Amino acid sequence: MMKKTSLALPVKALALTLGLYCPTLFAADAPLKVGTTAAFAIPLEAAVEEADKQGLKVELVEFTDWIAPNVSLAAGDIDVNYFQHIPFLENAKAAAGFDLVPFAPGIINNVGLYSKKYKRFAELPEGASVAIANDPINSGRGLQLLAKAGLISLKPGVGYKATEEDITANPRHLKILQVEAVQLVRAYDDADLVQGYPAYIRLSKTFDAESALLFDGIDYKEYVIQFVIQPTRKTDPRLIKFVDIYQHSPVVRAALDKSLGKLYQVGWEG
């Protein structure tokens, strides 16, 4: 079953929600509620169908932003979410005080640098516009990509926490524009270079997700997407079974291949 929802609470309301919520023991016969976003929904739907065949009822809840899944999980409205990597989770915990932990790894989505106008980085003009994500973690990933492409230099060791203040060299005087990550696909027509997420590009059907000038790929294992839970859920047998299905079912692997092509790697192997 798929249910779509959107939720965004102000910080004070969020704190109130978390303060009032008292977690209860999970009910083994209740459906497992899994929160996600559109980029990860198709393979999860395959896992839900496979779980149903094995007698496990799962309800998939699709959110339209990257804030609501953690708010909903912290409030106990869902049992697990699957949309974020550990750096994103740690940033969300620091910002809102969530008591959430990673439970098991999923996949790592390749992120790339795309251009509608240019085929090589060498063609980028002086002062070219570059659109990257605007949240603290994914903007760092975008800056890492620009550094990997040789377009900028960053302070040593900043990693995914990189900000524009950490740029030590920008020889082409690139103009960096920060855009909400899920909206970056729309910047493709306007910016000279765009940080892109293949899953969202495929959903938009606007250009070829495999046409990036550069991908980061498995270079950055910290970006493996995680199944995230409240700590009290770690022994939930429904959760354990569902994650096992996601990681090991041939049906799910086929859905991943169909949805993402070659632009992902699994995070639970090697």
Image (cartoon, rainbow, N blue to C red):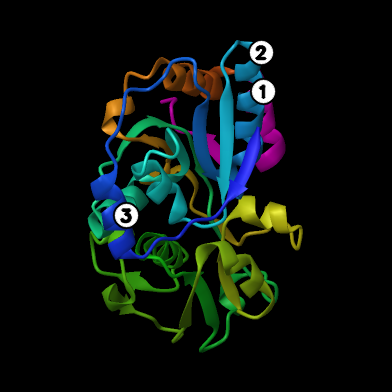
User: Pointers 1 and 2 in contact (CB under 8 A)?
Assistant: yes
Identify the element where label 3 is drawn: helix
Amino acid type at circle 2 is Lys
Residue under circle 2? 53
Q: Who is closer to the viewer here, 54 or 129?
A: 54
Q: Which residue lies furthest to the front in this view?
A: 20
Mark 3 burial class by Cα count in 10 Å: few <14, some 14-19, many 20+:
some
**Could you tell me how far apart the alpha carbons at marks 1 and 3 are, in whole angstroms?**
31 Å
**Disc 1 and disc 2: Cα gap in Å?**
7 Å
- Mark 3 sits on what residue? 92
Residue sitting nearer the eye, 22 or 200: 22
Q: Which residue is label 1 attached to?
A: 49
Question: Is 1 drawn above or below residue 127 in the view shown?
Answer: above
- Residue type marked 1: Glu
Question: How far apart are labels 2 and 3 at the CA level?
Answer: 35 Å
Q: Can residue 112 be seen in this view?
A: yes
Residue 23, by quadrant, is: top left
- x and y percentages locating residue 208 in the rendered image: 73, 57
- Location of residue 10 by image quarter: bottom left
Q: Identify the residue at image location x=47%, y=39%.
A: 82
Residue drawn at the location 42% of the way across and 46% of the way down: 72
How many C-alpha atoms fall within 10 Å of the one at disc 2: few (<14), some, or many (≥20)?
few
Could you tell whether 1 is left or right of 230 in the image? Answer: right
Which residue is painted at 57% across and 26% down in the image? 58
Residue sitting at x 27%, y 55%? 16
Q: For mark 1, give the secondary structure.
A: helix
Amino acid type for the residue under numbered disc 3 = Ala
Give the number of callouts.
Answer: 3
Query: x and y percent of residue 76 in the render?
Result: 38, 38
214 vs 242: above or below: below
Residues at circles 2 and 3 in contact by the CB criterion of under 8 Å: no
The magenta segment: 250-270
